[in-house]
Image: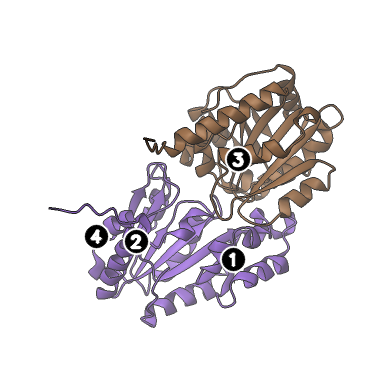
Chain colours: A purple, B brown
Amino acid sequence: MDIQVLRRLDEKNKANADETRALLDEHGVRSVNMMGSPGCGKTALLERILPLLQPTLRCAVLEGDLFTTQDAERVAALGTRVIQLETQGSCHLDANLVQRGVRELPLGECDLLFVENVGNLVCPANFDVGEHARMAVVSVTEGHDKPSKYPLMFSRADAVVITKLDLLEHTDFDLQAALAGIRQYNEHAPVFQTSTRDDNFDDLVGWLTGLCGQGRRHGGA
Amino acid sequence: MDIQVLRRLDEKNKANADETRALLDEHGVRSVNMMGSPGCGKTALLERILPLLQPTLRCAVLEGDLFTTQDAERVAALGTRVIQLETQGSCHLDANLVQRGVRELPLGECDLLFVENVGNLVCPANFDVGEHARMAVVSVTEGHDKPSKYPLMFSRADAVVITKLDLLEHTDFDLQAALAGIRQYNEHAPVFQTSTRDDNFDDLVGWLTGLCGQGRRHGGA
């Protein structure tokens, strides 16, 4: 007689994520899970860094959204290979959907894979999607209190990108307080201060390039 | 023999929400569920409108956050009765937690109750918490594409508040596109254009006051 096993959903997710990571490792592809609030500037960041990365690295993007292909179209316009992952209203990407996306990619022609998660500072932090590194993105206009109010996202990040620095002078954002908030939950992640209106992406591009170079293995959550 | 009934979680939530709404109705209290992304300005909005409302209406706030009492402290500083609802990492308020908060309030001394939800443009839209009206808050800095990318939040709103209008000139935000995006999913909700750096809250305050005056009954989702 067959015994029905209802495996816990998070165990199933972890197994899928590990499979995906193994498949990526096999092809020498590094993956970055980009997470942050709606409108924090994840896609705008990709629009700036992909042209800087592409001369040396073959990049691809899995674009997570509840609905629409708006962001995927922006990435495709850069000549980057992109697949839209539509969650149909779900608040985060899970490992199964990302795995399906990864299997559609020509992994032999790829060095660095960005997975742009659904705009949400809460739920995505709980789901390993098979990434090698987690990037938390937070914008100046969201306020410097965000790291301390959403600690899970920042504590699990391998890198933090602060965006929209050009708006700093027009807001009450306290950069030192934000940095202190990040360090309260995360001692080691590099913090990159950026603005898509300026050319200040060298450090971030260097970090991403290093991620590919060092063959770093990261177990995920 | 007792039969174990595992009621669907969303049915249980709806039942709790209906109970809360009935309790509020009994005391003539109107409730508004404020929802929006992290850092869209929900608390800052409360800081501006509560002083304008309080001369004529007795207000209270249930302040939803994953962790910390930072926002509750900001509201308490206005002399407003506030209770912190800490979700301990959960991405939305549910009807049970709000009901517990409502039961702690002296409802006989209250006309208008704001429930500030967890910063999240996705999950809160799926949970009736016993509100009479739903307010979707979206900031200029999040981008004009947000209504079309997060349609559930906007389609179910009874009012939409656009915040941070003072930053309009420093961004690529297209106000007409944002308004069209809202109207695509919601034909009737009033849209209030605000900035906490200006005094443009009359229409919003009028709408909230009217909500209390008209004894409007709203079934929730």
In the picture shown, does residue B95 fall above or below A163? above
Q: Which residue is mark 3?
A: B35
Give the number of the mark in front: 3 or 4.
3
- Residue B137 seen from this side: no
Tell if the residue under mark 2 belongs to the same chain as the one under mark 1: yes
Q: Nearer the viewer, mark 2 or mark 1?
A: 2
- Circle 1: element type: loop
Amino acid on which the number 1 mark rests in the picture: Thr
Chain of the residue under label 4: A
Name which residue lies at 53% across and 54% down: A122
Where is mark 4, residue-wise? A103
Task: Nearest to the eye among marks 2 and 3: give it.
Answer: 2
Residue drawn 75% across the image and 30% down it: B107
Spatial CA span between label 2 and label 1: 36 Å
Whole-angstrom CA distance, mark 3 to mark 4, is: 36 Å
| Mark 4 or 1, closer to the camera | 4
Q: How far is the residue under mark 2 from the one under mark 3?
A: 31 Å
Q: CA distance from mark 4 to mark 1?
A: 32 Å
Image point 73% across, 63% down: which residue? Answer: A174
Task: Locate residue A194: give its quadrant.
Answer: bottom right
**2 and 1 marks in contact (CB < 8 Å):** no
Label 4 with label 1: CB-CB less than 8 Å: no
Residue A198 seen: yes
Mark 1 = which residue?
A194
Q: Give the residue pinned by disc 2.
A: A11
Helix or strand or loop: what does disc 3 sit on?
strand
Looking at the image, tell me whether mark 2 or mark 1 is earlier in sequence order: 2
Marks 4, 1 in one chain:
yes
Of all chains, the one bearing label 2 is A
